[in-house]
Image (spheres, coloured by chain):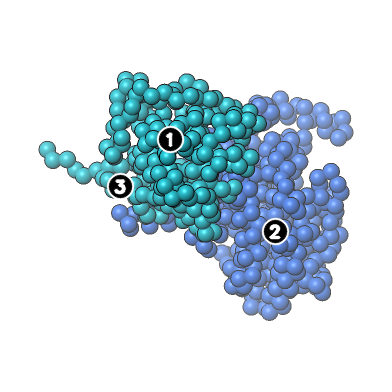
Chain colours: A blue, B cyan
Amino acid sequence: MSLSRLARAAVRSLQPSIATTLLGDWLGNTRDPGPSRAHLDGAIRWLCAAQDQTGGRGVSAGYSVVDGWLPPYPETTGYIIPTMLHYAALSGHASCRERAQAMADWELEVQLPSGAVLGGLLDVSATKPAVFNTGQVILGLCAAEREFGGSRYGTAAARAGDWLVEVQSRDGSWSLEGVTTETQVHSYDVRTAWSLLELFELTGTAKYREAALRNCQWTLAQQRPNGWFENNAFFARSGGWDRPFTHTIAYVMEGLLESWRLTGDQALLVAAERPATKLLDLYERRRRMAGQYDAAWQGNYGFRCLTGDAQIAGVWLQLYEASRDIRYLNAALRLNDDVKATQRLSALHPGVRGGVKGSQPIWGQYTRLMYINWGAKFLADSLMREEAAMQRLADRDAVRT
Amino acid sequence: MTASVRIVVLARGPWWLRMRHDRLATALASAGYEISGIVVERHPTRAALADWTGKLGARLVVRKGLDRLLGRKPGVSLDDRPETAARAFPVYRVGQHNSAECVALLRRLSPDLVVLRGARIIGPELLAIPRVGTLNAHYGKLPEFRGVDATEWAVFHGEQPMVSVHWVLRGVDTGAVVTSGVVAIEPGDTLGRLRDKSAVLARQLLVDSVRQITAAGLGPSAAPAAGRQFYKMHPRLRELAQRQLPRPSPSRA
């Protein structure tokens, strides 16, 4: 780190909100989580603040203790669109719907001529297209097309889908040199397969479905008998970096579950259930989630990857909906509580207030010293699923009594 | 015959909780068995209070505490046998049941049977010590409701809460059931009160089980692998489970 960045970080650390976070994490303090709705509103307000930082269009990747507000992030802005639309429908806040449209319009502007989406943040360093990022933006554009119509979002999504089909390897994987990753093929690209299935639903074009199914089959072949997925870390280097964070482990489960929802292929559901039940068992026995797991499911408990926690809770909630096995809901409620307990709803600084850190403690290995937009997004998604599940249970209860 | 059966009770509690007149040990002794000792694992006071209030509810904990302080008989109306207050048993306090210190102590006590009374998961080294085996009273129907908070999970699923006395094997709640009984739900019952009733029923069933085992020369066996392993219930689900219980009948003015 250069001297000037270090100096900036030191000055930021003196701000009361940041100082309190650093001190609280150092002391291991957590707060009692409040009602889920308050935490959901807090996460959405943080996302709105992150969007406002970049002129109300793309969403800033996050707030960094070192660098302040970061440039907008095309990939995550893409998948924040459905979150904002869902929240707008749930809360009746029309402004969130407008914000989602502004995000989708921005995605059209930054889309590459090839149809692909840039890897990394939208700054001078972003020069190369990225497969996964393109898939996540397709999810946002499909949601925008369904919500706003007019065909321009659908057309852009189809251009992105065409590029994905074009660059797919024959075995169903995608193998492009990464922008922010060292590894070339990724199991978590099954989330990109999901985006192609969404695109097929929107357009009816068979090649998107075929490409998605090829990738699903490739992903299933990556699974070990213990539920573990090969090729799922960002980095190949040793020292723990070759172990996937819970974030990417959850990405695979999300991609498989959504692909199962859209295809009805039970093998995808079974493949998602295996790591999900393993993680549930580990979490319930240890009463906490690790930040990373290795191929034998040995966890690194030195930090928590909070976005991964929120995503896993979301996966358990999806499995609860699919199976009605109450143990999934029970664990999801607890894991959401764990993330909520790290969220500060009344902090003074807008980069902290309602935000979700990359790691707990904030200096943990995943996106060190940052509040990240995808952390807030996945917590919001999980809390909206939680509320829907609890409402259905309460309704069942009301019918019984 | 019964007097030759030596029993050690494994319990858990804070340092200040007197266990010399433990009701389970008293009931077993009254049935003619020799109590070699009560081995109590240390449970920090704050954690113990949080545990009790979480399971029974604050009101019931306060009432039970007052009963104890004032020497009153507990309010639960099941057929609980009267205590023989004069009998006191040797109490041994250990840091953890699975510690080397406790293993050595248990080897010295050389029990025929170990009976668990609120102990945590027991390791294989300890399980190998008793001549016959180890028994536990699980507050739930086995194998359907294995694991934690089984009373609450049964109520949540609209099923009758039960107590099952079973052999303790290496897996959680995987030993064969020796005896079981149903906990009656009455209007006005809370989850905490059901647990309290379960404790009384568990005492009776444990004495009956030891009687059956010694009479028939039974030994540990595994239950068929079935059922689901449950974990600690989240407070929001607990609230829903509580709402499943019948409300008290309206009193007439």
Amino acid carrying label 2: it is Asn
Residue B63 rendering spot, x and y as whole percentages: 33, 28
Asked if both marks, 2 and 3, belong to the same chain, the answer given is: no
Image mark 2: chain: A
Where residue B185 is drawn, which disc sits there?
3
Where residue B196 is drawn, which disc sits there?
A: none
Q: CA distance from mark 1 to mark 3?
A: 36 Å
Q: Secondary structure at mark 3?
A: loop
Q: Residue furthest left?
A: B253
Side (left or right) of B101 relative to A7: left
Chain letter of the residue carrying label 1? B
Residue B139 visible, this orientation = no
In the rendered structure, the answer to whether residue A186 lies left or right of residue B101 reads right
Q: For mark 1, what is the residue?
A: B3
Q: Residue at x 48, y 43 (%)?
A: B136
Distance, label 2 to label 3, CA atoms, is: 42 Å
**x and y, in percent, of residue A208 in the image:** 70, 74
Query: Which residue bears the numbered disc 2?
Result: A226
SS under mark 2: loop
Residue at (48%, 50%) from the top-left corner? Answer: B218
User: Which residue is more in the foreground, A216 or B194?
Assistant: B194
Q: Examine the image and state in which quarter residue A317 appears.
A: bottom right
Disc 3 residue type (three-letter): Ile
Q: Which residue lies at the image location 59% right of the left edge and 47% below the top edge?
A: B170
Crowdedness of circle 2 by 10 Å Cα count: few (<14), some, many (20+)?
Answer: few
Asked if badge 1 and badge 2 are on a common chain, one would say no
